[in-house]
Image (tube, rainbow, N blue to C red):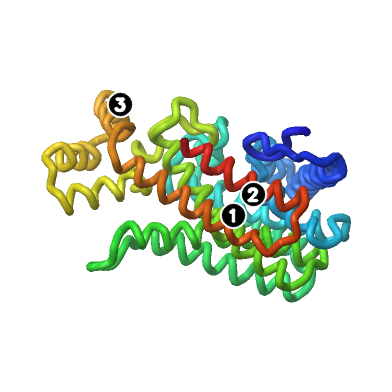
Amino acid sequence: MTAVGPFGLSVRDQALEADVQTGLAAVEAGLLDATKSDVPFITEAAQHLVRAGGKRFRPLLVMLAAQFGDPHAPGVVPAAVVVELTHLATLYHDDVMDEALVRRGVESANTRWGNSVAVLTGDFLFARASHILADLGPEAVRIQAEAFERLVTGQILETAGPRDGNDPVEHYLDVIAGKTGSLVAVSGRFGAMTAGAEERFTEILTQYGERLGVAFQLADDVLDIASDSHESGKTPGTDLREGIATLPVLHLRALAEQHGRAEDVELVELLEGDLTDDARHAEVLRRLRVHPALELARRDTVRYAQEARAMLAPLPDGYAKAALVELCDLVVHRAG
């Protein structure tokens, strides 16, 4: 039994382990090849986050989903490269929008080279992903285009905020489904589709990926507050400091509005103040860590992970299915 992929996923079969490890190694080589340019500076910028590492969560899902068809089919690795390139491109753009200083434990591209270079590098990665995608056929292009539309829509909805009368928590969950769930869903679909899996299996793995992607992001929201050492390379409370209203904060605001408890209202007021002040930031973080809002966010994470797990029931039993089940458990474990 060897740990592979994000969070030390245990693969209990030597053949499956070999397939996954070989596939992920090929994806890594494919990412480096896809980010090369005749212009050395572009190569440096494009490979900045590739070389910083990462969980490779989406390529891992592609590899596991491919086990329900022919995992050695020629389109599997390119499909995994496409989803990871797309994910990396969104990170360059996200860091510009969020004015982030650090990504994956290294200086963000916008901090190092400026916003214009970061945005254009993200565009370069999208272009390279599209080039690879074209070789996978028109259906793959259509699926990716639809997912990318959902991803961008989610980002716009997040920027615009909920309309008057809309539940901010439900709005946020819709945003996450678009921004994160859509591409993880494509990972499941591409893995099964390029491996020639049955259509019913492909649909199951797509729906599984959607729910797992949401759970994965919600676990990150919890970790931003609850952890002492954030897995993503960010320090605890980074989202708080940057003024990003993640799920625990939204639950806090809802509780304050519903019940009007003085301590909740006071904490909301602290959140709306200047969190670049270290003392204020530390106080908010300390109080959120013991607040019921954090537990509500954990429960939402568990709910989506359980929904993802339930989707797997019709799949044939085996080591690949067991690994997909364990991914759900590990996402929940991350959230405590």
Which of label 1 and label 3 is nearer to you? Answer: 1
Gap between marks 1 and 3, in whole Å? 36 Å
Point 64% across, 56% down: residue: 86
The answer to which quarter of the image holds residue 12 is top right
Where on the picture, by quarter, is residue 192? bottom right
Rendered location of residue 261, percent (x, y): 13, 43
Q: Position of residue 167 (x, y in %)?
A: 29, 62
Q: Nearer the viewer, residue 94 or 212?
A: 212
Question: Please, what secondary structure does the residue beneath circle 1 have?
Answer: helix
In this rendering, the answer to whether 324 lies above or below 227 is below
Q: Is residue 80 visible?
A: no
Q: Residues within 10 Å of mark 2 (few under 14, many from 20)?
A: some
Cα gap from disc 3 to disc 2, whole angstroms: 36 Å
Tell me whether the residue at label 2 lies in contact with that at label 1, contact meaning CB atoms closer than 8 angstroms. Answer: yes
Quarter containing the N terminus: top right
Earlier in the chain: of badge 1 and badge 3, it is 3
Q: Which residue is mark 1?
A: 309
- Of circles 3 and 2, the one toward us is 2
SS category of the residue bearing label 2? helix
On the rendered structure, is 79 left or right of 325?
right
| Position above or below: 139 against 219 | below
* Circles 3, 2 touching at the beta carbon (< 8 Å): no
Q: Which residue is mark 2?
A: 325
| Residue 221 in which image quadrant | top left
Q: Considering depth in this image, is 165 or 272 the residue closer to the camera?
A: 165
Q: Which mark is residue 101?
A: none
User: N-terminal of the two: label 2 or label 1?
Assistant: 1
Q: Please name the residue shown 80% across and 56% down the image.
A: 67
Disc sitting over residue 282 in the figure: 3
Q: Label 1: few (<14), some or many (≥20) within 10 Å?
A: many
The residue sitting at 77% across, 61% down in the picture is 132
Residue type at the position of mark 3:
Ala
